[in-house]
Image (cartoon, rainbow, N blue to C red):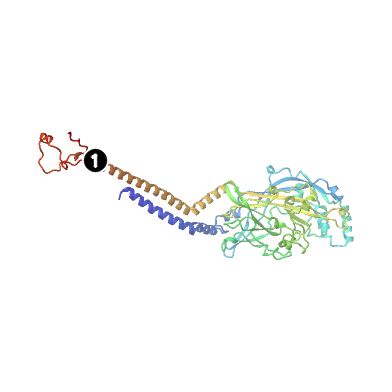
Amino acid sequence: MTRRSCAIYCTGIVCAHLLIVGIALVVAQVFQTMIHSRLKKEITLTEKSQVFEAWKNPPPPVYMEYYFFNVTNPGVFLAGGKAAVKQIGPYTYREYRPRENVTFLENGTKIYALNPKSFVFVPEKSAGNPEVDILTTVNIPYVAVMDQLNSYSFFLRTFVSIYMNSLGVELFINRTVHEILWGFKDPLLTKVHSMKPEVDEYFGLMWKKNGTHEGEFVFHTGEENYLDYGKIDTWNGLRQMSWWSSNQSNMINGTDGAVFHPLINRNELLYIFAADLCRSIHLGYVKDVDVKGITAYRFAPPSDVLMSPKDNPANAGFCVPARDCLGTGVLKVSVCREGAPIVVSFPHFYQADPAYINAVDGLNPNKEEHETYLDLQPTTGVPIRACKRAQLNVILKRVKGFPKTRFLNDTIFPIMFVNETATIDDESASQMRTLLLIVTLVSNFPLLIVGMGIILLLVLVVLFCRNRQKKNEVKRIDFTEAFHSFATAKEDTAYTQVSNKPEQPPETQASKPAKNGSYIAMSPVEAEKC
């Protein structure tokens, strides 16, 4: 066997083994199963896991942007006209949210934690100075008092109204952005506090929320089931709320939005429990996006999340009392927070009933600026980018006994909205890209084996063809040499004597006539002259 033949046989054997093994691995998905199994074990809230420290102290910076609706025509609105507002902001704060008092429960299958949030003003990312900028907005303590007295007698309401007028309290107030946001001593609440000490005399949209937490959480670590990773087990000791009107609406579903289980697919719904909304919401897949070179799935709340029960009966449980429902795009949350009739929505009433948008001039909802979304890396479930956007509104309507409201048109009045954003930092993004590259290479290793087998198959075909061509050339050379030798032999035997008689002298031969059969005629012989 020649070297060429040996090389062909060896290449064929290696090629066959690579193709068989590679195809078998692809069909069995051995490496993908191995990677998925490793991810399910590694991505858990345990002290040994690599994600635990990131969950405990989130590395990406979180920014809270506050936008306010400055009322430009309060007199017109009080007289029965349409209110006009102008958006001001953002006033941006860096948000710090470490996990504290972290304690493992039930053999590491659950984990207890507090999540206090603190805010630091960032002037370079803000449009103004909150301690200087003056804002005209609804006097929420005024509205809260009216709402609390709504079930009392007309005479009591009238008496309170006269007393409030004597204090100089109006339905609209002028305060700095800092006061509206972080609190000020309100004259009306001060009087109420003197009669009911449990009522705080200070008011602010974020009063007592800087450095405090939203409740005590117990999370599943994902040790028992990777799909439970980060899901809330209890909130303030509750597995189910009680202020909504149906069991489904009272359920505490999903995570707190900081983590999600690995191996996310496009067809599933993701659930988040929002403590500030007193409910769980779901998010659906929207599209694939790229964030710092990382492919992510974008999930966002579909339009049915805040849809009217007429269009989505599943939302009937959020009507309190039962069948006392608002329209599409708004949710009344004052049932879980004492005080004014507060309503939440998306900014500028995005995805809400046009009636709410048209009730106030100056609103311009659009998807790019007002949609809430999460960009998640599907393999690890890590949020790469997040934008949580929500608007705070208050219900303004006529209340008998309060003459200042007699001309009001019932309006869900916008106060402010927040844009809470976070994007993965460059260092974490680089680590994520490296991890995903390793996962991709390992997962696709069987395809690499198949590819090598195909390459060797092509080499085998080339070697076989060249070997075949070489053999044909050798055969042609051998035939030419044989033919040449044979031709030479003919010349040498053209006049070979075949008679057994002794050869005569030349002159004798010339004098004798030629006889048939004396010579083999292999070459031309001159005809005998007559």
Residue 299: percent from the left, percent from the top? 64, 54
* Residue at the limit of the structure toward the front, as seen here: 530
Q: How many numbered discs?
A: 1
Three-letter residue code for mark 1: Ala
> Does residue 213 sit above or below 129 in this rendering?
below
Side (left or right) of 91 relative to 196: left
| Element class at badge 1 | helix
**Relative depth, front residue between 298 and 390:** 298
Q: Tell me what residue is drawn at x 73 percent, y 43 percent.
A: 129
Q: Where is residue 417 in the image (x, y as percent from the top left)?
A: 73, 50
Above or below, 173 relative to 236? above
Displayed quadrant of residue 496: top left
Looking at the image, residue 480 lies above or below residue 281: above
Q: Is residue 246 visible?
A: yes
Residue 134 picture location, percent across and down:
78, 45
Q: How crowded is mark 1: few (under 14 residues within 10 Å), some or many (20 or more)?
A: few
Does residue 453 appear to the left or right of 206 in the view shown? left
Name the residue nearer the viewer: 156 or 294. Answer: 294
The residue wearing badge 1 is 487
